Image (cartoon, rainbow, N blue to C red):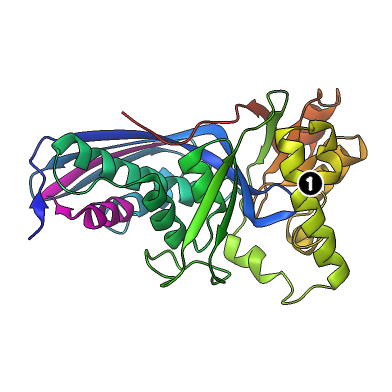
């Protein structure tokens, strides 16, 4: 029989955005970025009460279909506990559908809040870091964004067997798949710049543009660049330009994100290691140098807002 958490137990989490791929590391490299969602929950009387403010607030359900609520319930189930009811608050700063891992952040935040409730109550089985990565990656169908939001900094992630190219958003959707991740110590000279547009993109749509097979030449190219990216991120940031080259996904997605492709090209022509952030349309630049003087104006001309953000720590429960 599951333990019931008492009314009044409270937990809150701050979870960072993330950028996946970093150019060549498709579905395996990621980095946590200093744009945050704040999520809190209290055990309450029977029923669910949820409030959402900030980014995407008008486009999400306010019932148990909300991704954060689903993740909290998944975490509570994994911990072997239940609750009579929940009061949930979400303050979102991570833009939705921009390639900044908003769904992974929501899931990681919800799971972390559930773990916080369990630890605060002193009952049930607290969730380990490995369990957080596993459960969150189950939702996503790939571990790059989720593991970055859990561990912070840069990460390399992998699974023990092939997974569906698109997660269906249901925890446990890839039975038998184990996900793993390790944090990379990012070189202190590296800075992160994000260029976020007002327009959105759909991960499902952009994944659908990718070919089922690529040439051996392109596969070898990306393997070498992904390996080089680990060296560049941790030890030799002067290698970030070649380390962020890609032949697997960015060019295939360019037709539906022409402004993104144009901005990446403009920056790279000027020596900036720019990539598409995740499935886009945000542009990410990781560099140890200053951006060209006209970068902010060029970004604005193409419909993007440029900001420098910190390379963030992982989710924090408080």
Residue drawn where x is 18% and y is 46% of the image: 86
Horizontal placement of 76 versus 271: left or right? left
The crowd level at tag 1 (other Cα within 10 Å; few <14, some 14-19, many 20+) is some
Q: What element carries label 1?
A: helix
Horizontal placement of 240 versus 163: left or right? right
The residue range painted magenta reads: 70-91
Identify the image quadrant of residue 289. top right
Q: How many discs appear?
A: 1
User: Residue 59: x, y in percent?
Assistant: 42, 51
User: Residue 225: x, y in percent?
Assistant: 80, 51
Q: Could you tell me if residue 101 is visible in this image?
A: no
User: Residue 75: x, y in percent?
Assistant: 28, 52
Quadrant (top left/top right/bottom left/bottom right) for the C terminus: top left
Q: Name the residue under label 1.
A: 228
Quadrant (top left/top right/bottom left/bottom right) for the N terminus: bottom left
User: Residue 123: x, y in percent?
Assistant: 13, 44
* Residue at the outermost bottom position: 212
Task: Indicate whether residue 90 is drawn in magenta.
Answer: yes
């Amino acid at each position: 029989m599951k333990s019931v958490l008492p009314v009044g137990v409270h937990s809150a989490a701050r979870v960072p955005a993330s950028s996946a791929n970093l150019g060549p590391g498709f579905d395996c490299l990621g980095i946590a970025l200093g744009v945050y969602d704040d999520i809190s929950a209290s055990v309450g009387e029977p029923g669910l009460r949820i409030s959402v403010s900030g980014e995407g607030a008008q486009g999400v359900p306010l019932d148990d279909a909300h991704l954060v609520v689903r993740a909290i319930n998944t975490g509570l189930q994994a911990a072997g506990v239940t609750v009579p009811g929940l009061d949930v608050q979400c303050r979102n700063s991570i833009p939705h559908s921009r390639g900044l891992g908003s769904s992974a952040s929501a899931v990681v935040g919800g799971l972390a809040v559930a773990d916080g409730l369990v630890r605060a109550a002193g009952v049930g089985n607290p969730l380990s870091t490995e369990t957080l990565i596993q459960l969150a990656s189950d939702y996503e169908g790939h571990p790059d964004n989720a593991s970055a939001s859990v561990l912070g900094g840069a990460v390399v992630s992998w699974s023990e067997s092939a997974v569906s190219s698109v997660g269906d958003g249901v925890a446990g959707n890839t039975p038998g798949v184990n996900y793993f991740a390790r944090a990379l110590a990012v070189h202190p000279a590296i800075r992160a710049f994000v260029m976020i547009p007002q327009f959105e993109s759909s991960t499902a749509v952009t994944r659908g543009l990718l070919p089922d097979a690529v040439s051996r030449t392109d596969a070898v190219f990306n393997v070498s660049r992904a390996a080089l990216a680990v060296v560049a991120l941790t030890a030799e940031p002067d290698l970030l330009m070649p380390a962020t080259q890609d032949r697997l996904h960015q060019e295939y997605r360019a037709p539906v994100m022409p402004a993104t492709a144009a901005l990446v090209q403009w920056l790279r022509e000027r020596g900036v290691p720019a990539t598409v952030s995740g499935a886009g349309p945000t542009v990410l630049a990781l560099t140890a140098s200053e951006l060209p003087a006209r970068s902010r104006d060029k970004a604005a001309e193409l419909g993007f807002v440029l900001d420098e953000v910190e390379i963030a720590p992982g989710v924090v429960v408080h």
